[in-house]
Image: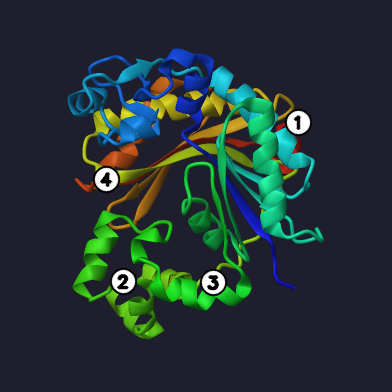
Amino acid sequence: MSRKIVHLDMDCFYAAIEVRDHPHYKGKPVGVGGESGRGVLTTANYEARKFGCRSAMPVFKAKQLCPHLILTPIRFEVYRKESRRIRKIFARYTDLIEPISLDEAYLDLSYRRESGAAVAGEIRKAIFDETGLTASAGIAPNKMLAKIASDWNKPDGQLEIGLQDVEAFMRGLRIGKIPGVGQRGLSTLAKMGVQTCGDLQKYAKAELVGHLGRWGLELYDRCRGRDDREVLVDRIRKSLSKEKTFRENIHDVEWLIQILRGLMEEVQKSVATHKDQRIKSRFIKLKFEDFSQTTAEKSGSQIDEMVFVDLLRIAWNRGQGKSVRLLGVGIKFTSEQDQLEFL
């Protein structure tokens, strides 16, 4: 039986909430982020994106691109409250929910008789009716395809990729649409004559490994629309983290520190919902321009900015000057075995 996986992605979530709560912002470019000279945008609405503003962009650069940008402070508690409301809506339709962040999640609707597209449409309507916010959806046989599809008709749209459509869809898909393929990867693939997934399919698995290493193995399956990952519903969390993948690689550790603070605050808010679990360590994850990655970790139970900044600098130095394409901030909880040893 073909799976019915839905990827629900809120449209410019933080900025959309600010526009909803401040009706006089409607139709104007809005960004959410810090006012300081080295602050960064957390997100920007579509009006601001027309000027080139985007998440993780330095505020000063965003204001250069869009001098009349309305900049609002981050209100994580408000965003979390709305996220909880939306997840309750998801839960009316399935118990198989994998939240990715405050504004996106995977839902497994395989057991439902209705079409995935019909249920996704119902969910999106319920979200709008109850919150005034719009969401986009992708419906497909696996998580990767669902995520690609959710971005297809943004904002406030959806796309279904049926099992019978996968082969043709992937053949013509631009390679940059595959999650995880950034600017550096595109440049490398362009030198191989690859612009579409169909181009990449012409390479044998051994050839891709020779050109791209372990990443080649992953791309061999991805360019054919293959992804066997399950929608994960973790009853007892072993860890909790927030990640940010950048549209353009970041070359300055100080900018990363600014982004770290926002991610750390999200982690802190999430930890508050796991009061029955004890934190045993804190960690930072970096993925570099060449897709190599490193994790720096330190034991301890406090979410301390100085600790995270120190871990970030340790991880940054391991890159030896490489730019960063992903930053993750997280904590690990004690397991039952850890607690028994502690007792």
Label 3 Cα crowd, 10 Å radius (few <14 / some 14-19 / many 20+): some
Position in image of residue 111 (x %, y %): 80, 60
| Residue 343 tag number | 1
Quadrant containing the C terminus in the rendered view:
top right
Please name the residue shown 46% across and 54% down the image: 152
Q: Which residue is mark 3?
A: 226
- Three-letter code, disc 3: Arg
Camera-side mark, 4 or 3: 3
Label 4 Cα crowd, 10 Å radius (few <14 / some 14-19 / many 20+): some
Instruction: Identify the mark nearer the N-term, 2 or 4.
Output: 2
Q: Which residue is mark 2?
A: 212
Helix, strand or loop at label 3? It is: loop
Q: CA distance from mark 2 to mark 4?
A: 19 Å
Label 1 Cα crowd, 10 Å radius (few <14 / some 14-19 / many 20+): few
Q: CA distance from mark 4 to mark 3?
A: 27 Å
Q: Between 8 and 320, which is closer to the camera in this rendering?
A: 8
Q: Which residue is mark 4?
A: 249
- Three-letter code, disc 4: Asn
**CB contact under 8 Å: marks 4 and 3:** no
Q: CA distance from mark 3 to mark 2?
A: 18 Å
